[in-house]
Amino acid sequence: MDLYNWLKAGHVIFVVALMGGLLVYPRYKIHQLSSAPGEALFETMKDASHRLKNIILNPSLILVWVFGLGMVFVDWQRGGQIYLAGWFHAKFLLVLIISGLHGYFIGLGKKVDRVTGTVQAKTLRMMNEVPFLLLIGIAILVIVKPF
């Protein structure tokens, strides 16, 4: 058994879970905004987004980092220098942006839950596309390694 491949499998599994959650979470909040506090839809979407955050999003983000850093460490132990590659630096930057986006989405979600009126559905619709665009960039960097 190769530890690196096990770490890679875990990394990919939790990247998929994280990306799925980041694509769904804003949609839940858009539906929540389409109803008034106390209405069934508002409360259902509030509960669903809370569960998504606690069961999928937060644990997946943590495990993506754990498995990813584990791969870098195992590569380094074997004498590899993946951490010096230009494509890796670019990927790392995009991963930092995705991590920040996760926090931004959670912050917006809390504002929707508190009914501050400062979050617009249009903003959530536009932001909903960003994780997918970042994923495209990361996939190209990891598979093609353009530099």
Image: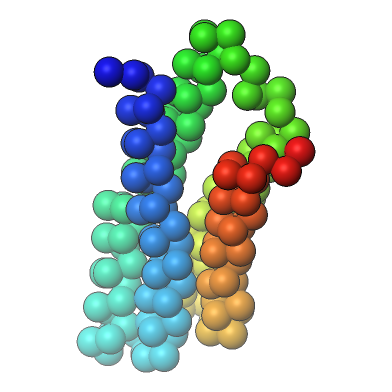
Does residue 86 sit above or below 102 in this rendering?
A: above
Residue under the point 39% across and 61% down: 20
Which residue shows up at 35% across the image and 36% down it? 9
Residue 60 to residue 9: above or below: below
The x and y percentages for residue 3 are 35, 19
Q: Quadrant of the C terminus?
A: top right
Does residue 117 lie above or below 88 as drawn?
below
- Residue ID at (37%, 90%): 36
Q: Is residue 37 left or right of residue 107?
A: left
Residue 128 position, x and y percent, is 53, 72
Q: Is residue 1 above or below residue 25?
A: above
Nearest the viewer among 99 and 1 is 1
Q: Residue at (28%, 86%) from the top-left corner? A: 41
Judging depth in this view, the residue of 68 and 41 nearest the camera is 68
Expressed as whole percent of the image width and height from the top left, the position of residue 73 reads 51, 17
Q: Is residue 38 left or right of 87 when viewed as pictured? A: left
Q: Is residue 109 visible?
A: yes
Of 106 and 82, the residue lying toward us:
82
Locate residue 52: give its quadrant: bottom left
Quadrant of the image for the N terminus?
Answer: top left
Tell me, yes or no, if residue 95 can be seen here.
Answer: no
Judge by depth and name the residue closer to the eye, 121 or 35: 121
Q: Quadrant of residue 12?
A: top left
Residue 19 spot, x, y in % from top left: 44, 57
